[in-house]
Every structure is written in C-alpha cells, then in structure tokens.
Image (cartoon, rainbow, N blue to C red):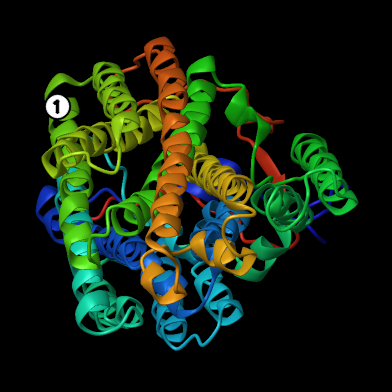
Amino acid sequence: MSSHGGDTKGDTTTLENFEDQQNRILPHKKLMVVFPCLAMAEMIAYMDQTTVSTALPAIGSGLNLGPSISWVATGFLLASTSIQLINGRLSDIVGRKPLLLICLGILAVSNLCAGFAQNSRMLFAFRTSLTMIIASDITTLEQRGRYNGFIGAMLALGNGMGPLIGGALTQRASWRWCFWFIVPLIVTVMIIMGITIPSSNVKGKAWAKFRMIDWLGLFINIAAVLLTLIPLSQGGSLYAWSSPLVIAMLTIGGVLLIVFVLIEWKVAKLPIMPIRLFQSDYSANLIFLMATLQGVVYWANLFYMPLYLQNVRKYSPLISGLIILPMVASHGIGSLVSGQIISQTGHYRPTIITANFIWLIGSSLQTIYTRTTPVWVICVIGLLQGLGIGCTFQPSLVALLAHSRKADRAVANSLRNFVRIMGGCVGLSVSGSILNNILRSRLSGDIPSTIITQLSSSAYSLSSYNLSSEQIERIVAVYMNGLHVVFIMYAPIIGLCCIFAVLIQDHGVAEKDAKAPSPPQNQQGEQVIRQPQVESSNPNEKTAMQ
C-alpha cells in the first residue's frame, strides 16, 4: 500500500515515535567528538560550492558552455530542490548516520565523474547527481547554542579555503582538479564518521515505512519544480518568453504545484511537506519566506561574483579567490559568533534582525561596483555580506526549531532547505536571463552572434576572438552593465528579509515542544499513522546515551 489512499488495516505506530525514536541525548564529552565530525561534512559541502564557483569562468571557456554556464549550479540546485523534501523522511527510515554516509558517497562519485566531463551534458549530469548532500543538515544533532560553534568554525575553514584552492588549481593545473581534489577528503571523513558517530536505533520494518512515504507527492513535486524552473532559466535566451513551450511548461508547472499542495493537505498519510508546518504560527511562515528570498541572493551572488572579478576586472582565478575570501570567511565567522551570542542570551530574534540589516548594507553597497572599484572596497563590502549571511542562516534554523513540534523538526528542516534552494534556483535563473538578454540586446549587430553566445559564460579570453580594441571595450562595458542590473536586484530582496525578521516572535531556546495543529489522534492522544505489519515502537525504549 502506498502512502496515499485509504486506510490500511494493520499495526499502528505514532508519529512521535516514528520520528523521535532516533533521538539520543549525548553527554558533553561525546558531543565534543561527534560534532567536529558533522562539522567536517559541512566543511566539505561549503568547500565544494566555493571551489567550483571560483573556477566557473574557466569551466565555461573549457567546455564552451555559453549561456548554459549557470546550469553548473542550477543543475545541482534543481536536483537538490527536487529531493530535499524527502530527506527528512528517509533519515527517519534508514537512520541519520547511514543516510549521511550515503550522501557523502554520492558526492565523492559525482565529483570524480564531473572532473572527467568532456562536454556540457556530461558535466550537468554529474553535477546534478550531487543531490542528497544537503541531507547533512538533518543528520546533525540539534544545532543550538554553544554547539553551533563547531559547525561555524569548520564552515569558516571550508568557505575560506574553497576560493583559494579553486583559484590555485584552475590557474596552476586544471579546473578539473576542483572536482577531483575533494574526493580523498570525503573518503577520509566517511571513515572518521563511521567510527565516531553512534548508530541510530531505528524501530520498525524499513520496507513497510518506505511504502508509507508520499511517493505520489514526491514525483509531482519534482515535476512541478522542473517544469517551473527550466523555462525561467531559458526564457529570453534559448526560448522567447512568448513561445508556446515556455508558456506551456510554466502553466503545467503551476497546476502541478497546486496539485502537490492538495495531496499533502488531503491525501498523503505521511506527507513530505505537512501542511501543519504552515499552521503552527506566523513566525514559522516568515522564516520560510525569509529563507526563500535569502536563497535568491546567496546563490546568485556566489555564482556571479567570480564572473565579475574574472570577466570584467580581468583578475586571475587565484586573485579572484583572494578577493572573495573576506566574504566567504566572514560567513563562517558569523555563524560561530551568532551561535555564542544565542547561547549566552537565550534569544535568537535580535541576532537575526541585526544580521539581515548588515546583509542589507552589504547588498546595497554592491550596487556601486564598477570596472574600477578599488579591491579593498570590494573586500569590505564582501565582509559585510558574509557576516550578515553567517549570522542569519544558523540562527534562523534555531528559530524554526523553536517554532516547530519535536516530531516535525526533521521535515521542517528539510522544508527550510527546500525553499532556500528553490530560491537559489530562481535567483540563478533570473540573473542568467537578465545578463543574457542585456548582452544580446546591446551587442547585437556590433558583435558576431557566436561570440555573444560564449560571452555569457566567459569574457576572460576576448583576445582569442580577433576583436578590435573598441569591440573589446564595448563588450566589457556591456557585461558590467548586465552584472550591475543583477546586483541591483539583491538589495530590495534582502530588505524584505529585514521586515520579516522584525516580525518574527522570539520563543527563546529553552527545550520545549512548540504548539501546532495535530493530525487525528488515538484514544491516548497520540497521532496515529496506519501502516501494514509494522512493529510498533515502545516509547520506553527511547534511550539517552551515556
């Protein structure tokens, strides 16, 4: 019996036990061993992002990607978005530790294959298979207070090292090594995690639980995401906005999105996106909205800053990485500092508000970027942006957990990641369309169309096109104009995040179960989910590890 449809006779299990049975309260000494291991996984994920982003112009030039270069990041984000909602349920079924090890294995194999890509199709396929690494977010213990420092410290290390490693490998060896070098690191982390992290005590039959998953909702969600984001990324460049294909895909995608919500609301027994997550209180909804908008700016900026530095400013990949370093390093430092502040004060709202306003200042100042902006100005602005990002991402997670029921925390975290990555897909798609349309509209007639196509990914090798100095000057000027429009988009979006941050209520970080509408309950007041022949979990078996 699938996860949708009518009731099925058989044993019953409560949602609380189904989702909370893996909770193990570790003493401080063991947390000091486990959390650095989990932080190393975070470090690898962020290092992978920032290393590849620095090498994007070289990748675009090497594989002749043209306007499709954004799919290096968009392909990864599309896959991550599509599978994100199921991660919470999968971790409940197979266990946190096994799922994280599987994710790291997928990341290693995908990076190894991406390094051997000979064309754009191969690269997009392998990059897209990095689907489940974001599940690392839900395999950690609750990231509250002082333990955020472990995550923040390693995140700072990964963010700081990524641009430098990516720039050095691209300049001294090949962009392919930006994918290959991380594979042995992943294998090492997998071995350490396999030894140090305690195994989950998952109750019940895994196959019966797999059958309970909302597979219909999952597939409809994937179809809705793909049919919506693909035309957004290709509209105005590969296809006209008025083309029947773009209109049809957007229409069908919108209809499927509505169908998905109805399935989660009325049909699914074990929904991957429980509607009650939006019914707990308005603060949780504000956090989801804020995460979506932050994803738009975060991913777009991470992608287009290297293009600005290398294509417009003509810096080498290594120098570009050094200039980006203050932004990505302060991201990790902000995460570390914000965790300590929340631990000391017991409140998250002031940190979230301050962080978003710092990010707003940085995003607003980014609009002054020109072809001659001093490097130190770029570094200072990047530092402000990174500090704001770091001081809002983790505190927002703490706030969301405070506004969620304990039984909903895995799926709530998955939904937060889903909407943030969804925002990233939209941000990259819209930014790419803006840049491509400006290049085509302002260079058409003066520059051959074949060259314009390649300019979308790399203007670093203009000398190889046999262009006059006047043509090169015009290309760089138009490229800067296009990026300037992209940068202008950031400030109002973060401004909305500031408004949402001010409206969020502060419940504190004390361990308590947030109030939320509950599904149908049994006579003992426990939420019941019917499943065929599943061993029921004993509430007394939830053990605290000593």
Place of residue 226 in the rendered image (x, y in percent of width and height, measured from the top left): 71, 55
Point 67% across, 64% down: residue: 210
Quadrant of residue 394 in the image? top left
In the picture, the quarter occupied by the C terminus is: bottom left
Q: Three-letter amino acid code at disc 1?
A: Ile
Foreground: 507 or 322? 322
Q: Around disc 1, counting alpha carbons within 10 Å, would you say few (fewer than 14), some (14 to 19), or many (20 or more)?
A: some
Place of residue 34 in the rendered image (x, y in percent of width and height, measured from the top left): 20, 60
Residue at mark 1: 341
In the picture, the quarter occupied by the N terminus is: bottom right
Point 52% across, 76% down: residue: 64
Left-right relation of 330 to 390 = left
Place of residue 189 in the rendered image (x, y in percent of width and height, measured from the top left): 24, 74
Place of residue 307 in the rendered image (x, y in percent of width and height, measured from the top left): 37, 55
Foreground: 44 or 174? 174
Can residue 470 be seen by looking at this rendering? yes
Point 64% across, 36% down: residue: 527
Mark 1 lies on a secondary structure that is: helix
The correct choice, above or below, for 427 with respect to 214 in the image is above
The correct choice, above or below, for 444 with respect to 55 in the image is above
Foreground: 232 or 478? 478
